[in-house]
Amino acid sequence: MAVDNSGIAFHYKVLKENTADSKTLVKFLIEMQRIYRIKDTIIVADKTISQNANLRYLKQKGYKYILQKHIDILGKEDKAFIVNKQGFVQENEYFTKSRFGESIW
């Protein structure tokens, strides 16, 4: 699904129920670019999209992205950051913390 700056959907696809998520991203982005010629895009996706080929494509094409990662494949430093109770900030009823890292893809 693609949404505008207000979060309103303007394009979506319904796929066959057994279509692997990891196989849909690149085709969808190519279709979106062909139809809308979008200039500034941020991809937000769950861990099923975080495949090497997808990450390389996003990086190669200059897309900004936010992807979920499996915690069990993270390095020691990343795991320590996640479980360390220091550094959290309360935002309404949620506690959050974040950091930026260089992509290895």
Image: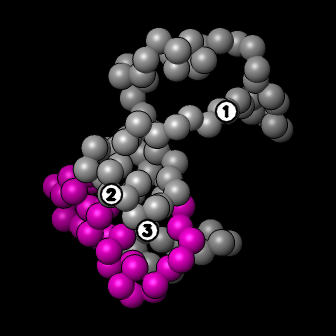
Which quadrant is the N terminus positioned in?
Answer: bottom left
Left of 102 or right of it: where is 7?
right
Residue underneath mark 1: 98
Question: Is residue 11 or residue 59 the one in the foreground?
Answer: 59
Residue underneath mark 3: 1
* In this view, 101 is above or below 29: above
Tag 3 secondary structure? loop
- Colour convention: one colour
Left of 25 or right of it: where is 87?
right
Which quadrant is the C terminus positioned in?
Answer: top left
The residue located at (46%, 84%) in the rendering is: 37
Tag 2 secondary structure? helix
Residue 45 in the image: state x and y as whole percent.
44, 51
N-term-proximal mark, 3 vs 1: 3
The residue located at (76%, 23%) in the rendering is: 88
Residue type at the position of mark 2? Tyr
Residue underneath mark 2: 57
Determine if the magenta segment contains residue 94.
Answer: no
Question: Is residue 65 or residue 44 the one in the foreground?
Answer: 65
Instruction: Report, in whole angstroms, how far the alpha carbon at label 1 lies from the one at label 2.
Output: 25 Å
Residue type at the position of mark 3? Met
Residue type at the position of mark 1? Ser
> Which disc is residue 82 wearing?
none
Left of 66 or right of it: where is 8?
right
Residue 89 appears in the rendering? yes
Q: Please state the extent of the stretch shown in magenta in the rendering.
A: 14-42
Instruction: Report, in whole angstroms, how far the alpha carbon at label 3 lies from the one at label 1.
Output: 26 Å
